[in-house]
Amino acid sequence: MNGLFVPPKPPVPAQPLPFRQFFRTLASNALSSWPAAAYEQPFIARNMLGRHNFIVNDPTGIHRVLVDNPGNYRRSPAAIRILRPIVGQGLLLAEGDIWKLQRRTVAPALAPRSMPLLTRHIVATTDEALDALRERIDAPVDILATMQNLTLEIAGRSMFSLEMQEYGREMRRMLTEFAAHHAKPGMLDLILPTAIPTPRDFARKRFKKRWMGLIEAIVRDRLRMPEPDQPRDLFDLLRAARDPETGAGFDREQLRDQVATLILAGHETTAVALFWALTLLAQDRNEQQKLADDPDNRTRAVLSETLRLFPPAYLIVREAIGADSVAGQAVCRGDVVMIAPWILHRHRMLWRDPDAFDPTRFLPGAPVPPRFSYLPFGVGPRICVGAQFALTEATIVLAATIKRFDLTMESTRPVLPVGVVTTQPDHAPAFRLRLR
Ligand code: HEM
C-alpha cells in the first residue's frame, strides 16, 4: 500500500456480534465491538432491548445531533456512571444552565489568546522532563508513563499553579485502578437509568470518596495561596466566577469537581495522543526522520494524523431526550446515538488508505477532509473546551522530544489500542532513546 506504515489494530467482526458477545466486547474493548459495515455505511441501527442504538457517520446526521439540535441529546447513563466518580458535576457532565455558567467561565482561560501564558508553563515543564530523560539513554523507557506524568504536571502548573509531583503518583495510581476496575461498562450499566444503581455503581461510589478526598487536598493547598489582584490562572478565574443572574459563585464542592474535571480531561487524553504519536514514529523510522528534518511543517501534521488513527476520545455518545429525525431516520426518546471518531476516522468512504499512517494528508496545502469526517475534539456547543490547549501542548512536547531523541521500540510485540474511556494501549511498551 504505497509503502505506507499500517499500525496494528484490533480485529473487526465481519458481522454484527450476537447480543451477549457484543456486551462482553463493549466492556473489554469497544473498538472491536462494531462490525465491518459500520466502517462502510453512513448509518447503522441496532435494536437493544426495545431501544435503538445508532451509529451515525452521515455528515447531516452528525450535524443534526451535535450542532443543530444538541438540546435534545444528553450524556448517556453509561457515560455518567463511569465518569461521575472522577469528574463529579464538573463541566464534562454538567447540563443546562449550570453547564452554561461553567463553560462561560472556563472557556476564556483556555481560548487561543490565553495560549502565550500557558505556553510558558508547557515549555518549561517539557524541558525539565526531557532533561530527566537524558539520564535514561540506552535504558528501557516507559513512554506511556512518561507522557502521563508530563501532561499531568503541565495541567497542574498551567491551570492551577501547582506542582503536581506531590500528588501525581497517588493520582496516577488511582486512575490506573479506576481504569482496571470501574471504567468498563457492565450490561446493567448500559441499560438501567442512572437513578437505579448497578452493582458496579456501589464500588464506583466508594472509589469516588477516596478520589475526591485527594482532589480536596489539592484544592485546600491551592486555597492557601494568597489571593492576587489579577487572576493568575484558571483556578482564580473559577473562584471569581459569578452567575450573571443570581450572582452566586461556585461552592466548594463545585470548585472541587471543576478541578477534578480539568485535571483529568486536561491530561489523560493529551498523554495518550502523545504516546500514540511517539509509538507511530518509533515504528515508522522514515517518518520520524522526516519530522526531525522539518519539525516546523510536519509536527502538526503528524499530530493531526495521530488523532485521526488513534482519537483519544474514540466515542461520543448521546441519549435522545425526545423524538427527532437524524439523516432521515426516526429517533425516539431513549434511543442511543453514537458518533465514533474511531469509526469515522477509518471510514472506507471518507478516507483513502484509511488504516495507513500518512501525515501528508494534513500538510499545509493538502485537500481538506470531508465535512464532519474528522472530529477528534467533537463539534458543536460541547466541543472540547481544551482543544487549543491540547494542540499547543502536544505540538510543543512532540517537537521537543523528536528534536532531542531518536526513538525505537524494544520489542516487536504489536501495541493494540483498547477503548476504555480513552484509547489506551493494551500494554505499555518499552522504548529505547538515543540522543539525536
Ligand atoms: C488530545 C487531547 C484531547 C482530546 C482528543 C479531547 C477530546 C474531547 C472531546 C471529543 C470532547 C467532546 C465530548 C462530547 O461531545 O461528548 C471533549 C470535551 C471536553 N474536553 Fe477535551 N480533549 C482533549 C484535551 C482536553 C484538555 C487539554 C482539556 C482541558 C484543559 C479538556 C477538557 C474537556 C472538557 C472540560 C470537555 C467537556 C466540555 C463540555 O461538555 O462543555 N480536553 N474533549
Image (spheres, rainbow, N blue to C red):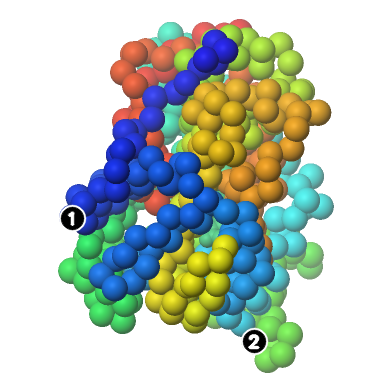
Q: Residue furthest bottom?
A: 246
Residue 122, image quadrant: top right
On residue 325, the disc is: none
Q: Please determine whether, in this image, residue 184 is positioned above or below residue 250.
A: above
Q: Nearer the viewer, residue 103 or 196?
A: 196
Whole-percent x, y for residue 194 in the image: 33, 76
Give coordinates of residue 432: x percent, y percent: 44, 13
Which residue is depicted at the point 56% across and 66% down?
328
Residue at image point 75% right, 55% down: 111
Let me know if residue 34 appears in the view: yes
Residue name at image x 48 percent, y 47 percent: 41
Question: Label 2: which residue?
Answer: 248
Which residue lies under the disc numbered 1? 20
Number of callouts in the render? 2
Cβ atoms at labels 1 and 2 below 8 Å apart: no
| Of callouts 1 and 2, the N-terminal one | 1
Q: Is residue 269 left or right of residue 363?
A: left
Query: For residue 233, what is the image quadrant?
Result: bottom right
